[in-house]
Amino acid sequence: MPGKQYDFGNVSFVIGTTGGMSRLIIDGYSLIEEGKTFGGLSYERFDFHDYTNFFVDYSRLTRWTTSWAMGDFGRRGIEIYSDVRHEIHQPSIIKAGMTLDDQTAQISLDLAYSDEDVKKWGVPKTNTLVYH
């Protein structure tokens, strides 16, 4: 299934290895930029630098917000955990299915993260992604 082009009348698409569409063409028009992916799932882990940038860019510290903003939007103490690095974890397709009728196609993808990512970072073991 991953990498194979599917054609349904005026629609064609290609599913990538992590469940996202790497190509979608409708009526001859490509809707996904070359090298990009539409959809799919991933788990993004942020580090101290990411939280600091977010806090500086989006918090509005005033005398009314100072008491709660750091606790709600900052991640105090994250800087001491040097093993926390910004990463994006992506699942792999473990099962794929497709149903067709006169008007629609439904693609169902069962995705799984690695056992190491599940154990170490708490990502879900499996997810299901459905395109209609």
Image (spheres, grey):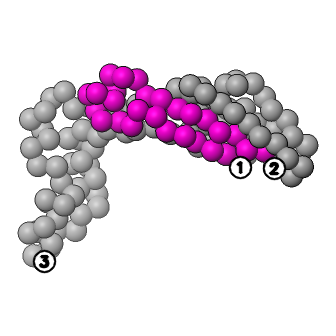
Span shown in magenta: 105-132
Q: Is residue 122 magenta?
A: yes
The label number, if any, that marks residue 20 in the structure image: none
Measure the alpha-carbon separation of dots 2 and 1.
Answer: 7 Å
Relative horizontal placement of residue 45, taking residue 48 as reference (left or right)? right
Residue type highlighted by circle 3:
Trp
Residue type highlighted by circle 2:
Thr
Q: With respect to residue 37, does 52 lie above or below?
A: below
Mark 3 vs mark 1: which is more N-terminal?
3
- Crowd band around label 1 with a 10 angstrom C-alpha radius: few (<14), some (14–19), many (20+): few
Q: With respect to residue 65, does 82 lie above or below?
A: above
Q: Residue beneath label 1, please?
A: 132
Element at badge 3? loop
- Crowd band around label 2 with a 10 angstrom C-alpha radius: few (<14), some (14–19), many (20+): few
Relative horizontal placement of residue 70, taking residue 93 as reference (left or right)? left
Residue 123 x, y percent position in the rendering: 35, 36
Measure the alpha-carbon separation of dots 3 and 1.
Answer: 46 Å
Determine the residue positioned at 41% across, 32% down.
125
- Crowd band around label 3 with a 10 angstrom C-alpha radius: few (<14), some (14–19), many (20+): few
Could you say which quadrant of the image residue 79 lies in? Answer: top left
Could you say which quadrant of the image residue 18 lies in? Answer: top right
Element at badge 2? loop
Q: Is residue 57 magenta?
A: no
Residue type highlighted by circle 1:
His
The label number, if any, that marks residue 64 in the structure image: 3
Judge whether residue 31 can be spotted in this image.
yes
Q: Residue beneath label 2, please?
A: 104
